[in-house]
Image: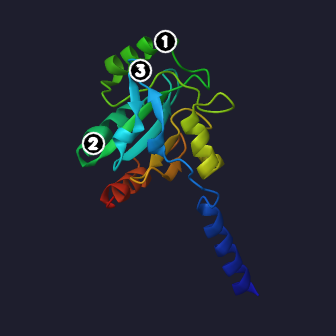
Amino acid sequence: MKNLNLVFITLIMIFFKSPVMANYEKIFFDFKIESVSGEIIDFKDYKNKAILLVNTASYCGFTNQYEDLQNIWEKYKSEGLIVLGVPSNSFNQEKKSNNEVKDFCEVNFNINFPLTTITNVKGDNAHEIFKWAKENYGKSAVPKWNFHKILINKEGKIQSTFNSFTKPTSSKIILEIEEVLKTKS
């Protein structure tokens, strides 16, 4: 009986680990978003790349993660990684204008990876990419706070999600990024 319970628990853990509800009528590459400078970022331009989508904020206790995000961008961009920062005031910790966000990121962290305009990331007013993430991956894709990370694989589907406490340079994230970058598309 003890072994049967262990098997049952293991099966349940495997079942709930993967996003079984994913139907992916659309993939990541089907969407667009406005950049912090006002141009349109068409995600189809990111096909066959790994994308680390991160909702960011200037006044958050995790804001120092910008430095790690820039570091992994510099290390892996030539291998096909896109770090995409999505400034958001969904948690009331972002500057008031896109220009302020852009200046803050460039001056304080020398950020040169793509940034979007200030964007809602949760609730009814969330950008469609975050609604898509929730619909296809479940609640773990919904940012609970700033610097929530969503890793998109080369097929345009969610590979994994990471909470705000997980540093961008943690082995957990780096191993997932490297796994996606190694896959053939």
Q: Amino acid at mark 2?
A: Lys
Instruction: Classify mark 1: helix, strand or loop.
Output: loop
Comes first in the chain, label 3 or label 1: 3
Q: Position of residue 16 (x, y in %)?
A: 65, 63
Answer whether labels 3 and 1 touch (C-beta < 8 Å). Answer: no
Can residue 42 be seen in this snapshot?
Answer: yes
Local crowd at mark 3 within 10 Å, few (<14), some, or many (≥20)? many
Q: Which residue is mark 2?
A: 77
Res 37 quadrant in image: top left
Q: Which residue is mark 3?
A: 36
Is residue 71 positioned above or below 25 on the image? above
Decide if residue 148 is on the left or right side of residue 113: right
Is residue 161 positioned above or below 89 on the image? below
Q: Position of residue 121 (x, y in %)?
A: 58, 32
Measure the alpha-carbon separation of dots 2 and 3: 20 Å
Measure the alpha-carbon separation of dots 3 and 1: 9 Å
| Residue closest to the far right | 1
